[in-house]
Amino acid sequence: MKEAGESELAALHVVRQMLRNLPTEQRLFLTGQLSALVLAFLFRYCLPPSHCGPKVRHGIATLLGICISAYCFGWLTLFLVGEVLLCYLMILVVDPRKIQIYTLLITMVYLTFFHIRRYSNPFVDELDFTVALMTLTQKMSRFAFEYHDGIVRSDQSLTPTQRRLAIRSPPGILPYLSYTVGFLGLLAGPLCSFNDYRIFIHGEEKKTNPNVAVFKKLWLCCFLLAAHIMLSDQFTISNDPNNSVPYIFLELYLTAASRRPKYYFAWTLADAINNAAGFGYNGISDDGEERWDLLSNLNMLKIETATSFKMYIDNWNIQTSVWLKEVCYDRSPFNPLLSTFLLSAAWHGVHPGYYFTFLTAVPITLAARKVRQTVRPWFQRTSLGTLIYSLITWVCTQIAMSYTVAPFIILGLGPSLQLYRSLGFCLHILPLLLLLILPHRKRLETNRKSFKDSPCDRNYNHLKKEM
């Protein structure tokens, strides 16, 4: 027993030293999320719905969220809570027919202001406040759209998903605060609908213990953190004019791949935190096992093996894709695809590289869609043809995605243009040529309906409750 205790103390000492050696931003994020993980277990065990009412659970979740925010962001917490109170006041006084537009506009302007502040002081020694604001923007704008659907629109005009998520009456201030600044999703999300969060707080779904799912995700987090530490600085985009085109594409792929474990780690840990509190149940799978993926933000296997641009996007930052689909793509009066990518760029920040990435993605997405419609059927006649098509499209998808996200990594406009110039803007020109050359085929389903249906349809907690 003595030796076991000494080994645990030694392990804690190593962890403490590691945290001290991390940059302030990473140290605050890790300690904040690890604190949220511990609090999530305590929240589930000490405040179960069977013993505590919704008001107590809402109140504790809000208080813990504000405390974590004060630790991570200090006085900036006032701006976090202030925006929430402003948006709640708007729900009470603004015409429900316009509430969704005003909320999206105000939250995006508010977020952009802090993006500009961060852009002006990129080396400030603090946790990036805009990360929390980005999730908050999603939550409050999504709430406003779902509230608009529930109050203004008729059930016949709503899709099944919109009808399920519609909010029929304004909630109290405490549930709204708990949903927006609660400790479970404060630092890294993930985004969830208000109705799903209400079901969790009230304990209305039947489920068993999520510990197995939580510990699997925590073990995965350990592996991803190690991968991030080992790989993050190993590859960079050099912009050396002497490099050949194949070498540049290889460099782009390795650089993009080495950056992904950071996002995998943050999103998997955030998912585990919510599961530890008992949130994230998504019904029973076909093999009879409980699913704890309601809030999952990624599918790593499908990302790394994606054979289409859409498959890659559908499995990367899933909850943000759901938000973009709900507040923009399904409702945009003009060019939904372009509107959605522009909103995504503005939501990410003010660096020119973000806009370059998402504008580059528009023709590539359209061309990939047309290739799938016209070329894919030729390869589906035999199993060998299907395999060949999958291999070719995997290579093309990884090349196209690495090319597209390069400005997202570089951030600056000048270096991004220099990189694309060295490649002859090849993946800007080729998609445009494909769109002109390939024949147009009518589809039975509209493109708007097909855009990212799968992530939204995966979140159907209400429909999977056991009777």
Image (spheres, rainbow, N blue to C red):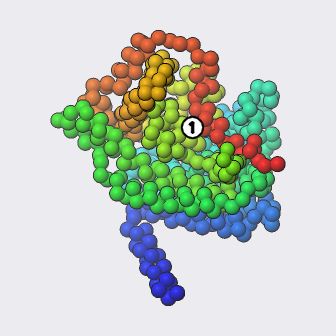
Local crowd size for mark 1, using a 10 Å CA cut-off: few (<14), some (14–19), many (≥20): many
Kindly tell me whether residue 74 is visible in this rendering. Answer: no
In x, y percent, where is residue 358? Answer: 45, 32
Q: Is residue 434 above or below residue 341?
A: above
In x, y percent, where is residue 459? Answer: 66, 42
Q: Is residue 183 left or right of residue 222?
A: right
Which of the pair 241/446 is nearer the observer? 446
In x, y percent, where is residue 154? Answer: 80, 28
The furthest residue to the bottom = 2
Count of number-bearing discs: 1
Q: Is residue 395 left or right of residue 178?
A: left
Image quarter of residue 123: bottom left
Going 45% across and 76% down the picture, which residue do you hit? 11
Instruction: List the residue tagged with mark 1.
Output: 321
Q: Is residue 320 left or right of residue 192?
A: left
Which of the pair 47/353 is nearer the observer? 47
The furthest residue to the left = 242
Does dot 1 land on a helix, a strand or a loop? helix
In x, y percent, where is residue 377? Answer: 49, 19
Image quarter of residue 150: top right
Q: Is residue 81 above or below residue 305?
A: below
Kindly tell me whether residue 43 is visible in this rendering. Answer: yes
Going 34% across and 53% down the picture, which residue do you hit? 231
Going 54% across and 30% down the picture, which residue do you hit? 340
At label 1, which amino acid type do we have? Ser
Going 45% across and 81% down the picture, which residue do you hit? 7
